[in-house]
Amino acid sequence: MIIDIKDNTVTITYEQSDPIGRSFRDEIKIRHKSFSFKNIILDLSQMKNVLSKHLKDFVKLAIYHKQFNNKSFVVVTGPIGIKHLPDGINVVPSINEAIDMIEIEDIERDLGY
């Protein structure tokens, strides 16, 4: 996993050598504490087949991050069918769209929405 911190955003990129499943999710949860007050982009676009079960592993963390830290949590998956998307998590197909989503949510927070 590659962790890149720029300004107020942390990008965590999945690498092919990373384990898939609970061990990967647990590693993200452990590291989450060190950047809990930043926006998070979780880039899973290098995963060959992102399944809804992979996304569901991060729903609780995403909801917690938004509610208690008042920051964005966005997952980049590349192309994925809309029927595979769980509720409670922002999923986009590219890094640029993840950055756009964070900017929109920052504006909403500034306006009090």
Image (cartoon, grey):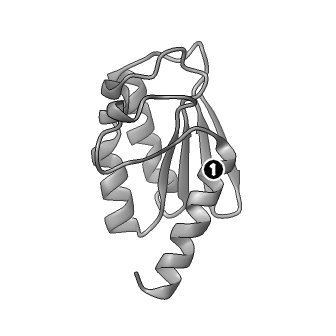
Find residue 16 and report its image quarter.
Answer: top right
Q: Position of residue 83 (x, y in %)?
A: 33, 32
Under circle 1, the secondary element is helix
Dot 1: few (<14), some (14–19), or many (≥20) neighbours within 10 Å? Answer: some
Q: Which residue corresponds to the image point at 41% horizontal and 70% vertical from the top-left?
A: 70
Which residue is painted at 56% across and 77% down in the image? 107
Compared to residue 56, the image places residue 6 above or below, namely below
Tell me residue 42's x, y (percent): 53, 40
Left or right relative to 101: residue 70: left
Q: Nearer the viewer, residue 46 or 93?
A: 93
Q: Quadrant of residue 48?
A: top right
Q: Position of residue 43 (x, y in %)?
A: 57, 36
Name the residue rendered at 55%, 72% in the picture. 106
User: 74 and 33: which one is in front?
Assistant: 74
Q: Is residue 16 above or below residue 100?
A: above
Q: Is residue 83 above or below residue 104?
A: above
Residue drawn at the location 49% of the way across and 64% of the way down: 37
Looking at the figure, which quarter contains the C terminus?
bottom left
x, y percent for residue 9: 62, 57
> Looking at this rendering, what residue extends furthest in the bottom direction?
111
> Which residue is denoted by mark 1 in the rendering?
97
Amino acid type at circle 1 is Glu
Count of labels in the image:
1
Where, quadrant-wise, is the N terminus in this rendering? top right
Residue placed most toward the observer, 94 or 81: 81
User: Left of 15 or right of it: where is 70?
Assistant: left
